[in-house]
Image (cartoon, rainbow, N blue to C red):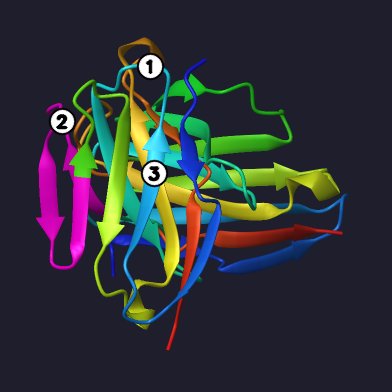
Amino acid sequence: TQLLEQSPQFLSIQEGENLTVYCNSSSVFSSLQWYRQEPGEGPVLLVTVVTGGEVKKLKRLTFQFGDARKDSSLHITAAQPGDTGLYLCAGVFRASNYQLIWGAGTKLIIKP
Amino acid sequence: ETGVTQTPRHLVMGMTNKKSLKCEQHLGHNAMYWYKQSAKKPLELMFVYSLEERVENNSVPSRFSPECPNSSHLFLHLHTLQPEDSALYLCASSQDIRTNTGELFFGEGSRLTVL
């Protein structure tokens, strides 16, 4: 069974600080998605990465896919209270019949 | 507004009650999903429907019974639930069943509390 490990589980920082959260697996992903879930809402897709070493930017968010496609990171620059939420990574492994395998998430709180 | 609507948003039920969760998608997608979300745990895939046919049932107890009358509607019928079934139940849809790179569109969820 493929597992995704997300770290840290919880992070609380001040507005303006930078942060990085991680998503790791012992297996190779076919692709990986990052979602953000705000309180009282469902998850919303932020980005999909497919190619090893790929870097994608979404305003102050930078997503990186590891060269070996076993890990990914999300870096937020100058965090703002609007970034508060649960960040979920979800990966596709060939052996999972192309269904998404989810991590448990990183709960991020940005204090004003 | 994601195009996926779930009702009710909150539900409290006793262990002997029968209730249903409803999901409707306005995106023209062919695949619909039920997920269970519990605190500090990964999303658990419960059921997958593709073009109204169930294609996945991840060993979900029979007290959860899905129904997909058409490609836009999905129900989750609940009966004789246990307190450990209390969770956020999320409905999602995607263009097709292969989510290799495709996006899942989620509803806002139905928060279920079983007393």
* Near-viewer residue (A97 or B47): A97
The magenta span reads A45-63
Q: Looking at the picture, how far across and down is residue A61, in whole percent? A: 21, 61
Q: What distance separates the C-alpha of mark 2 from that of mark 1?
A: 14 Å
**Residue bearing mark 3:** A22
**Callout 2: SS:** loop
Q: Is residue B29 left or right of residue B11?
A: left
**Callout 1: SS:** loop
**Residue bearing mark 1:** A27
Q: Is residue A46 magenta?
A: yes
* Near-viewer residue (A62 or B58): A62
Q: Which mark is residue B67?
A: none
For residue B105, say whether it is visible: no
Q: Looking at the picture, how far across and down is residue A64, in whole percent? A: 20, 42
If the image is split into quadrants, where does the N terminus of chain B sit? bottom left
Q: Nearer the viewer, mark 3 or mark 1?
A: 3
Q: Residues within 10 Å of mark 3 (few under 14, many from 20)?
A: many
Q: Quadrant of residue B51?
A: top left
The type of residue carrying mark 3 is Tyr
Q: Residue at x 39, y 44 (%)?
A: A22
